[in-house]
């Protein structure tokens, strides 16, 4: 099927970061097709937005295949003397946390012609007892 390997490329300035999507042929995603020139690529204002666009592109390639879902816990241990609300933690995590796949080295999925999409659903964040 597809050996489509996509990357997010940081561009812009530190004050105004932007992100492009590139494929393994050094083409750039325009939000509808691939272009040879970086200047024709669609700029995303956040890495999360670029990541969602990549998922959409990959789903267009693999989405007709049967899907199975697996869940694995992600733990966040917060050390602070200041009270922090769940909303503050969730908002911070959305900005800073990244779950990435090294598709260039290991492929889009565990076997040939497969796609594994990863995501963290921070809306389900809850505090647990550490005892």
Image (cartoon, rainbow, N blue to C red):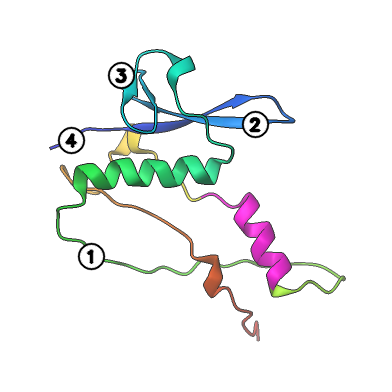
Vertical side of 1 occupied by 67: above or below: below
State the quadrant of the C terminus: bottom right
- Regarding residue 75, the answer to whether it shows in the image is yes
Residue 29 point in image, percent of width and height: 38, 28
Residue 89 counted in the magenta span: yes
The reply to whether discs 2 and 3 touch (Cβ–Cβ < 8 Å) is: no
> Which residue in the structure is indicated by mark 4?
2
Spatial CA span between label 2 and label 1: 35 Å
Cα gap from disc 1 to disc 3, whole angstroms: 30 Å
Mark 3 Cα shell of 10 Å, populated few (<14), some (14-19), many (≥20): few
Residue denoted by label 3: 25
Separation (CA) of disc 4 from disc 2 = 30 Å
- Residue contact at pointers 1 and 3, CB within 8 angstroms: no
- The numbered mark, 1 or 3, whose residue comes first in the sequence reads 3
Residue 97 pos. (x, y %): 59, 52
What residue occupies the far right of the structure in this picture? Answer: 81
Q: Which residue is the site of mark 2?
A: 17
In front: mark 2 or mark 1?
2
Rendering quarter of residue 79: bottom right
Q: What is the secondary structure assignment of the residue under circle 2?
A: strand
Query: Magenta segment range?
Result: 87-98
* Label 2: few (<14), some (14–19) or many (≥20) C-alpha neighbours in 10 Å: some
> Counting residues from the N terminus, which is met first, the one under dot 2 or under dot 1?
2
């Amino acid at each position: 099927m597809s050996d489509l390997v996509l990357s997010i490329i940081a561009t812009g300035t530190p004050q105004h970061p932007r992100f492009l999507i590139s494929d393994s042929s050094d083409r750039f995603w325009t939000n509808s097709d691939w272009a040879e020139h970086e200047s024709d690529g669609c700029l995303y204002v956040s890495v999360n937005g670029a990541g969602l666009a990549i998922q959409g592109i990959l789903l267009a390639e693999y989405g007709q295949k049967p899907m199975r879902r697996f869940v694995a816990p992600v733990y966040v241990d917060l050390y602070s003397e200041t009270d922090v609300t769940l909303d503050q933690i969730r908002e911070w995590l959305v900005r800073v946390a990244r779950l990435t796949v090294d598709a260039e080295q290991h492929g889009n999925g565990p076997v040939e012609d497969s796609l594994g999409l990863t995501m963290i659903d921070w809306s389900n964040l809850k505090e647990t007892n550490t005892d």
